[in-house]
Amino acid sequence: MAGPGTDEGVLDVLVLGAGFGGLHSLYRLREMGFRVLAVEAAPEVGGAWYWNRYPGARCDVESLVYCYTFSPILDAEWRWSERYAARDEIVRYLRWVSERLDLRKDIRFDARLTKAHFDKEARLWHFETEGGARYKARHFLSAAGPITTPIMPAIPGLADFKGEIIHTARWPETGPDFAGKRVGVIGTGSSATQAIPIIAEQCEHLTVFIRTPNFYSPANNRPLTDADYAWWTENREKTRQRLQLGHRWGGGDIMLADEINDIMFRASTDFSPEDRRAVYEARYANGGGVIGWAFADAMINPAANEEAGDFLREKVRDVIEDPVVADKMTPRGFAYGTKRVTVGTGFPETFNRANVDLIDVKATPIERFTERGAIIGEEELPFDILITASGFDALTGALTVIDVRGEDGKSLKEAWADGPHTYLGIGVHGFPNLYMIGGPGSPSVLTNVVMTNEMQVEWIARLIKHIADSGHSRCEVTTEAEDAWTQKVNDLVKGNLWETADSWYVGANVPGKPRAILAYVGGYTRYKKECEEISDAGYRGFAFS
Ligand code: N01
């Protein structure tokens, strides 16, 4: 694969992606003196945030804790405008970071990676992009993002539909004008929850196809004030520490009073039903996605989980006026949090609008699509625009869509045919000198992703430095280490509720994807400790030569 067309010589590290993980990796490795280049499919930095341009796209983790901490300069100079940053502001932030740290000269944009093959003899990775550019590097660091490979709904006839079809994660730069249009939305996950209220306000008629109603909580977004920033200056370290200790994905409640926030480290059984209710109400009034994780036993004690679920089910019924619609929107049959909870602004309220219909596709499935719309029973429902908010091939998809081959020619897709096998979610046996940020088997999406990315970037950068300093050129995860880690990831989830629902957390949303918990459920702090013990022990589980 190498040869004409290669213009960069042999790199020390090729970084895949210029989102949060990729930019930090590029910066850190370059600071360490390595020759690094990042390749990015998009024409701009941002990663997942570049592509998710749908109306209402906004982070549902609070902006103060959805940004870098590795650089005091960045920490001091950036100021977020809202409690939850809109997609455009996050892309602006990452663009500013890329300029402030002078990263852009080492990023190749519009460069979608299609091939990465390891050459056993030369101990080099050879890369090719869609545009035909070729690169060679000693190390391959993937920061491709855990939720970046969109999937379309498996509904017959979708290709026959002659109107516009848009996946939320492939939203065109200039989106459609919804005025006077009949719009259909498939899905009610996080993306749809944010997009639906805005589309409903603009279009003539909106039909939402719901399959599994999910637990929802209001964001309570608002501008951030000087007083907020004064609070932040005082509470930054404490808040970051709390995030590291908490078993949850985000931080949708960082400004809650300590006495309520710290209850999340105690079991619900320590409190009376009245006191528990008061805690849920306080969290609900504050807004954010972790209301149901108010207590430490939410994911291990079914009764505690059920109580949190009941609280949120009651809120749905309070908001939606039509009891039939409210019933269709009420989550049941799976535990709170086992499908990624959704957060939004005015989402259930939207179903009180006269121009919005809700169709439960479990009760009345879409038989197929036609040129004009959807066939449901005897009826054809015509649409001008169809929006698929149908999700992603999470954690593994970003790498298995690329032709990644290890030293015996086996592809990563083949290696993971029965589920992902990794060591620390970072390395894979048979794929020397490959490292992943946010890979399967790491805490990734079950923690604050930016925080865990940062820890992994620093750890992997030190590993690459260790390899270089010790005069080695090959680093491979041993089979034993990979097997033991994969077993641990699967054992950790036993006895708690995480894997009990059909969710993307276990790959259940992708037809044919083997069912396995995709992320390490042990939390950030335990994971970090495990990684540090391994590096302190001379990178136990990695073989160097
Ligand atoms: O995707 P999803 P998403 N017929 O997989 C439905 C992150 N995120 O893009 O639940 C009918 O959650 C499917 O139904 P079901 C966040 O981690 C973060 O919304 O499978 N329906 C579901 O309702 C999130 O979890 C932010 O039964 C069909 C929906 O489509 C992740 O990205 C913002 C169907 C897919 O929901 C993915 O979110 C947005 C079919 N054939 C997203 N096929 C932040 O703010 C699928 N569905 C940080």
Image (cartoon, grey):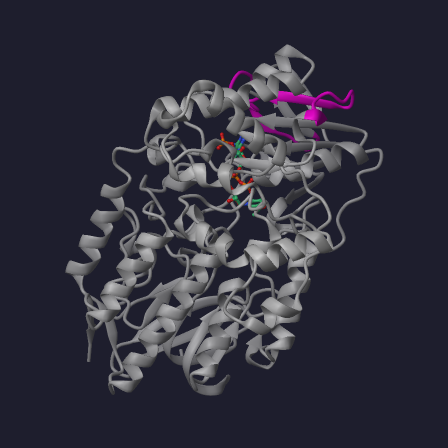
Q: Is residue 188 visible?
A: no
375 vs 124, left or right, is: right
The answer to whether residue 38 is above or below residue 472 is above
The answer to whether residue 266 is above or below residue 474 is above
**Dominant SS type (magenta):** loop
Task: Name which residue lies at 43% across and 40% down.
Answer: 504
x and y, in percent, of residue 343 in the image: 59, 37
x and y, in percent, of residue 389 in the image: 59, 39
**Nearest to the observer: residue 197 or residue 122:** 197
x and y, in percent, of residue 511 in the image: 41, 38
Task: Name which residue lies at 66% across and 57% down.
Answer: 230
Is 132 contained in the magenta span? no
x and y, in percent, of residue 170 in the image: 62, 51
Magenta segment, which residues?
349-372
Is 357 contained in the magenta span? yes
Quarter-of-image position of residue 198: top right
Looking at the rendered image, the quarter that the N terminus falls into is bottom left
Task: Name which residue lies at 66% across and 17% down.
Answer: 379
Quarter-of-image position of residue 283: top right
The answer to whether residue 102 is above or below residue 419 is below
Quarter-of-image position of residue 264: top left
